[in-house]
Image: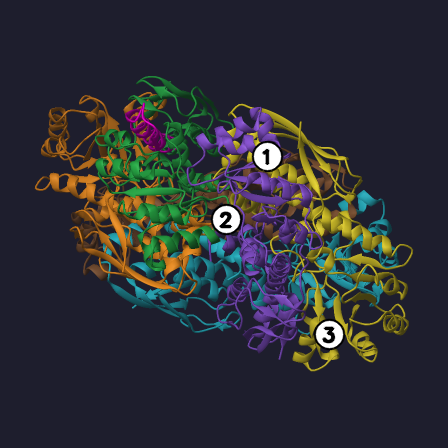
Chain colours: A brown, B cyan, C yellow, D purple, E orange, F green
Amino acid sequence: MLPSIDALIALALEEDLGRGDVTSEVIFERGAQASGRIIAKEPLVVAGTEVAREVFLRVDARTRCDLVVADGQRLQPGEVVAQVAGSARSLLSAERTALNFLQRLSGIATLTRRFADSVAGTRAIVCDTRKTAPGWRLLDKRAVLAGGGANHRADLASGVLIKDNHIAACGSVKAAVERARARAPHGLRIEVEVTSIDQIDEALSAGAEVVLLDNMTPERVRACVAKIAGRAVIEVSGGITLDTIRAFAEAGPDRISVGALTHSARSLDVSLEVE
Amino acid sequence: MLPSIDALIALALEEDLGRGDVTSEVIFERGAQASGRIIAKEPLVVAGTEVAREVFLRVDARTRCDLVVADGQRLQPGEVVAQVAGSARSLLSAERTALNFLQRLSGIATLTRRFADSVAGTRAIVCDTRKTAPGWRLLDKRAVLAGGGANHRADLASGVLIKDNHIAACGSVKAAVERARARAPHGLRIEVEVTSIDQIDEALSAGAEVVLLDNMTPERVRACVAKIAGRAVIEVSGGITLDTIRAFAEAGPDRISVGALTHSARSLDVSLEVE
Amino acid sequence: MLPSIDALIALALEEDLGRGDVTSEVIFERGAQASGRIIAKEPLVVAGTEVAREVFLRVDARTRCDLVVADGQRLQPGEVVAQVAGSARSLLSAERTALNFLQRLSGIATLTRRFADSVAGTRAIVCDTRKTAPGWRLLDKRAVLAGGGANHRADLASGVLIKDNHIAACGSVKAAVERARARAPHGLRIEVEVTSIDQIDEALSAGAEVVLLDNMTPERVRACVAKIAGRAVIEVSGGITLDTIRAFAEAGPDRISVGALTHSARSLDVSLEVE
Amino acid sequence: MLPSIDALIALALEEDLGRGDVTSEVIFERGAQASGRIIAKEPLVVAGTEVAREVFLRVDARTRCDLVVADGQRLQPGEVVAQVAGSARSLLSAERTALNFLQRLSGIATLTRRFADSVAGTRAIVCDTRKTAPGWRLLDKRAVLAGGGANHRADLASGVLIKDNHIAACGSVKAAVERARARAPHGLRIEVEVTSIDQIDEALSAGAEVVLLDNMTPERVRACVAKIAGRAVIEVSGGITLDTIRAFAEAGPDRISVGALTHSARSLDVSLEVE
Amino acid sequence: MLPSIDALIALALEEDLGRGDVTSEVIFERGAQASGRIIAKEPLVVAGTEVAREVFLRVDARTRCDLVVADGQRLQPGEVVAQVAGSARSLLSAERTALNFLQRLSGIATLTRRFADSVAGTRAIVCDTRKTAPGWRLLDKRAVLAGGGANHRADLASGVLIKDNHIAACGSVKAAVERARARAPHGLRIEVEVTSIDQIDEALSAGAEVVLLDNMTPERVRACVAKIAGRAVIEVSGGITLDTIRAFAEAGPDRISVGALTHSARSLDVSLEVE
Amino acid sequence: MLPSIDALIALALEEDLGRGDVTSEVIFERGAQASGRIIAKEPLVVAGTEVAREVFLRVDARTRCDLVVADGQRLQPGEVVAQVAGSARSLLSAERTALNFLQRLSGIATLTRRFADSVAGTRAIVCDTRKTAPGWRLLDKRAVLAGGGANHRADLASGVLIKDNHIAACGSVKAAVERARARAPHGLRIEVEVTSIDQIDEALSAGAEVVLLDNMTPERVRACVAKIAGRAVIEVSGGITLDTIRAFAEAGPDRISVGALTHSARSLDVSLEVE
């Protein structure tokens, strides 16, 4: 586990059972054992399995948690995610936190899967944004991968994305792109947001390698794609839904970024059934 | 800020700008100043305002962030949440993290408001569950309060809730409730889940003070309410939606707990407009 | 280990051997092995055994530490708590921190045992307070359990206890209790402190479920118990000592809370004898 | 605040109010203000004042906390330690944690004062040990200073103290002392425990600069002091109480170390009186 | 301060003064004040000024520390970096840690300046590597900027750099580059290491955007530059020194990366002169 | 691992692979295995081996890392430090951080070895200072031991060192030494810096046990050594290099402290060769 994931798990355990689990402690005798299965209760693409296992082990290192599936697998209702066994107190105390991770991350993977399936056969790839739950960046992005999406930049250091505020500060698209190209690490492409088809030549001649078309209609995207004509990678964004994504994908962009993948996926139903 | 909120904010800042914000650093000159307004872009009940302000201040203690509204207020599109001013780099670097907090928490508050409004005029109060985003327990629960809901237990130490697994371990509802009553801290009520109306007398005579009716129809809830006849607090739960909650509320329970408030609220649109 | 206990152990190790153990490092050769026994040097009820073992393992994961007893057992002088074996440097470096945990927690358990034994045969149960050593809440409370006491609320979220300052803010016992009952999570009972027998009916009719009788004589407690007549749980507190607790217990309350259990227990003598 | 004290305060706040303070939140309106005085309720030497103030400020940076006394001052019942003012919720939420620090640390300072006064007029100075509450080393030792005691080594790196286990590993006092002298940092004296008067010449000729006389009678201490004759600093330890310390001090040692100062001081009564 | 810098400062303060500063505490009276100037003792390019100030403030928030220069300025011996004033104890306790930051970071900036000056007039830009002191990544890289260098990728997520091990795993340069291009975030360029001029066309046709020429002579670099002919960014690396860098720069690459900037710069002499 | 070393490793991993290792993730298939050897590429005294192993294990607990040598051993180019095997992704992701630790610490050990060898045959011992990389104190000092040097005080609590600022505050060497002797823990010697031979008698008669001769020529050191005549330990410091240390050592001091050991050692070449 990377340190930031360790830290999030620590926060999660502390907030739920930092003062103990009064119900389990008063009900179960100290030595009582139990076992159970974590089961999908609705169709889903699973994600977060390793974090869930880590939660059980952090609560009690003697708990056994065997993962039956790996992140990215599609499950039908009733299919088993993992089998757990150990102290009854430990299993029940860890249950909610482990499930909360699984349910949220499987929600993201499953929603991503639906978006990704919607663009099948086009050149477009669905990708995430930085609109992740604070503290969950890496987990959210891995869930997107599990769902068949791609990752956009991981953080503010791993991509240059010039938006309107940046352009305004520099005076023009050209000035902004040139300044970025001169100063940014050489392993990063320069991506710039354009708001009209007229800015495209300016951006490309200044050295932009990725063009972001934000809040355009599929028709305008199509026109921009034609204008760019392979001279840059093309990303589309802006309130794209399952209903509209196909039209955007058919307009020809390389990437369609969807904030909803990580900020508005609903949790899916996964439960622990104790035997 | 409480230590756990400090820790979550630290995780959030580290994951997004721990290696710097390469775009802002290459575009804005060191001394460049900016100001802007955080604005609701759709109708919402706002939550997370103080956390958002803290994010701006943690990125740069010299940033000014004046909150215009308080958590719990209803806002229309275009209404201002806060005004910010300071270094252009600092504002832009903090923007996404601050908005991610605001959008998720306002989503929870707004969804809660809709559920709460749906039960107006009944005795039922909408409350949350422990199905919060790991690491976010306190924030999620405060957003529920902002939306007009009530809080269920804060963690595993602040409530006794006996479910089927616990009952199975003790052999009967009666044995489980009695054991819990004998051992639990005296400031906690004993809540027990009953799966049929036949268990109610057993639960009450053993000392249960709260009865949880899980996954019942409104009709069965009504029958149980009549049976309990004021001898215990009644909580209803189990996949209740905006479409069904009114029927449940009219069946007479005291509390309706809804996991979706915190695990499936979509983020709402809030943005920073730089002037 | 829960995160907060991990954090306390980390603080403890850092403060004592964060810069190394100069004596052990200069005296023992790197490969030198040793073994020993942790022994009670005076009669005691042991507590903290698992934390002590964790200390040895955190200093050196290759150390072997076998617990011979479990928390809550009574030991006579010379009886063995645990056996340890491993690198001489590691054992000696961990010794003081491990013993400091054991000695303080066994002190709490033992003192609790004496209080609990003093009320044998009455309905009263001895319980702790929030007067624990900052940073040690969970450990202190578990030591109280090991000594045969019960736990009062774990923290400020797991119990409602209305004291004079709260009553003053609301204007009356009645107003305070009613406000708390309306707003508090439904899994919590409302406990209210009463300073005279005259307030009892007001408190009960407003919905108080636990009455705290603070700083009363046993006689006054007896009168209040009669007045309450089973309508609420009764807790007594206020400077109660081993000399006076029996008289209070015989007056009929349900709980007697004693701050001294955790804030004034003396450490008991436990030592590591290297063979 | 040093990082380790920050960390302990964070643990303390998290454990008590990490999930909120349900009573204060339901009773006090958000804007309600209050003020009060922290008052000694029994005679004491105060310690921990700055930590207590920090607790109030960490809960709410807008709280005002003015210290009226400094660590080390003697207070009579009714004398004021500090004045506090701010949000009623914030004051009441911080109260218990702040007092828990003050009460434990004032207990240590006061007990130290009694020991120190007992040796007045002799050359002996009372000092502490490493038998502090894990996590509290620096605070406990500062409270000893506040009570007029001196500090022994701060941790395992700031003093060489050769005990019987170390001597056994080396074969003789002479070998142990010589090895330590050759290898230890040159800013540290070599202290060695001797169990009989016969070992003194061996220790001194090997280069010991401090001799620890453990578990001897005052008479034997006197004989050792005569034998050492100013050639080394002399420390006495081993179960010394307020009843026996004077006899030890009059036997002529330089230091008397007392574990009870930090491991067995009872908490003293300090309270917050809200006006 | 970003969280990771906060954490490093906390480690640094804890390790040096976590148990107090015994010399300052015994020598200076509690209220004693002092002031002083931090002065360059040899020619240098300064870096780390804000971290140094933070160290003084973290030790004592009442200390005043006014920075006279900004990171990146060249200073001659005797020139002032900052002025400090406050408690004598606080200044002396913070001194060494603050200077240790300043001296190491100014060493990096100064060495970078020398390398950068050596390539003046060529198209080459000197940049850093990931060979930074663990825990210091962001600080080390900012010191490189202060010295006139550029930053290479910030971490393993902010750049794709395919080396021999990666190529071996894929079977060919072509396969490796194509796989990376297909899977990597679209904001990242694909950089690939080539070991002979023959691999260049393969790399470029597969989509490589940056070519790393490792451990070549200036002559071979020149040949590769000609071969690439502007079709990719060219980086050179491999044991380049102040003696050899000019020859490499004149061979025509875009970037010359030098691990020594951060892993082998000597600390420069900066001291605090108390007045 | 001690907590502070754990914390530094966590910072190091977070800063380099906290957002993942994009190259390894896109290139290597999830299950791909690899093995390799960590090899010295130039002559060195190795240090940091256990930290390097811990880095591999923290990235992936299933990685195998067998240390072939122990800290302090001299290695020739091509000699193996450790063998590693496991997931290809895990090995490559951990590589740079593990090597960064090894290279810096081996640099310190090797430079120390050279200084130590330079004084062979004299009574002088080479020792370190507090001029370590912030966050690395314990590691840096252990590397000095590995290189055959000795440690000076570990932190500000484990030694009393009175410098000119302290003397000025007290008015005289005599006053400063006496005050320190009266107040400092009795396990610490009093060390005082003297700037002229005339201060020696004053320092010794006041009780100084160690005399620091700072920034003197070897000739002046020799005169001071004669003057002190065995009455105190003698330390020499001040810009001593490999060229000058022999002359200082022959002047007769006990310790020569060299800041460069830890602040200016260059990293040595160690690499991971994947098979």
Q: Residue at x 42, y 33 (%)?
A: F142
For numbered disc 3, what is the local secondary structure?
helix
- Residues packed near mark 3 inside 10 Å, few (<14), some (14 to 19) or many (20 plus): many
- Quarter of the image with the N terminus of chain E in it: bottom left
| Chain letter of disc 3 in the image | C
Q: Quadrant of residue A28?
A: top right
Q: Position of residue E47 (x, y in %)?
A: 25, 50
Q: Name the residue tied to disc 3.
A: C177
Circle 2 residue: F185
Snapshot quadrant of residue E211? top left
Query: Label 2 is placed on what type of residue?
Result: Pro
Where residue B10 appears, x then y in whole percent? 45, 53
Residue B158 in the image: state x and y as whole percent: 69, 57
Q: Nearer the viewer, mark 1 or mark 3?
A: 1
Q: Amino acid at mark 3?
A: Val
Q: Is residue F115 magenta?
A: yes
Chain under numbered label 1: D
Query: Which residue is under mark 1?
Result: D163
Q: Which span is picked out in magenta? A: F98-126
Disc 1 from disc 3: Cα separation: 60 Å
Left or right: residue B182 compared with residue B155:
right
- The answer to whether residue D270 is magenta is no
A183 to the left or right of A115: left
Report the predominant secondary structure element of the magenta stretch.
helix
Query: Depth check: A87 or D247 in front?
Result: D247
In the rendered structure, which amino acid carries the disc numbered 1?
A: Lys
In what element is the residue under mark 2? loop
Task: Determine which of the numbered discs, if any, sits on residue B182 in the image.
Answer: none
